[in-house]
Amino acid sequence: MSAWTLHLPYEAISWRSMNSRDHWSKRRADVEATHLYVNQHLRHVTAPPPEPPVRISVTMWAKDRRLRDADNALASAKPAIDAIVGAGVIEDDNWKFAPVWEVRVVPRPDDPGWTIRLEELR
């Protein structure tokens, strides 16, 4: 089974609540910035993309010890996952290609960031 991992800096992804009421132009600017970060960091991934179906694991390495909901971490990471799909790493992130998703929020004040991992399920 092959696996593929992308590490992003904390600022690459804007924290987003599922109930966010931001103006659409701010949201769009955040999404475009995330796509730019992902495309820059994709150049450093040397492993071949995994074959579907895959498990998508998102880990937010939080910059502090505040309590955060994992579903908001997933909502925040969605633009990064869409950028990975857009770059052709996996064909799509629907149930056919990515039937299993895992989300974790782990405090790591000394080295905050995001890790997105794709693993073959076969």
Image (spheres, grey):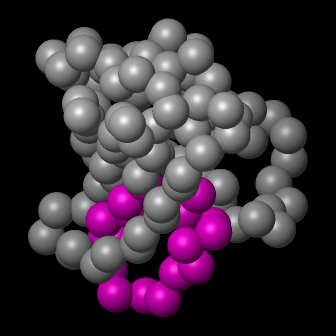
Asked whether residue 61 is in view, the answer is yes
- Residue 6 in view, yes or no: no
Q: Residue at 16% across / 17% down in the picture?
A: 46
**Residue 40 percent across, percent down from the top left:** 33, 18
Quadrant in which the N terminus is drawn: top left
Q: Which quadrant of the figure contains the C terminus?
A: top left
Instruction: Identify which residue, 119 or 22, lies in the foreground.
Output: 119
Q: For this rendering, which residue is in front, 1 or 44?
A: 1
Frontmost residue, 25 versus 106? 106
Residue 37 location in percent, x, y? 40, 28
* Span colored in magenta: 58-74
Between 96 and 72, the one lying in front of the other is 96
Q: Is residue 59 magenta?
A: yes
Report the label total. 0
| Residue 31 percent coordinates (x, y) | 63, 33
Horizontal side, residue 46 vs residue 41: left or right? left
**Residue at 23%, 30% in the rendered image:** 2
In this picture, residue 49 sits left or right of residue 54: left
53 in relation to 86, above or below: below
Say whether residue 19 is left or right of residue 115: right
On screen, residue 36 above or below 57: above
Q: Residue at x 33, y 19 (%)?
A: 49
Judge whether 31 appears above or below 9 on screen: above
| Residue 97 percent coordinates (x, y) | 59, 30
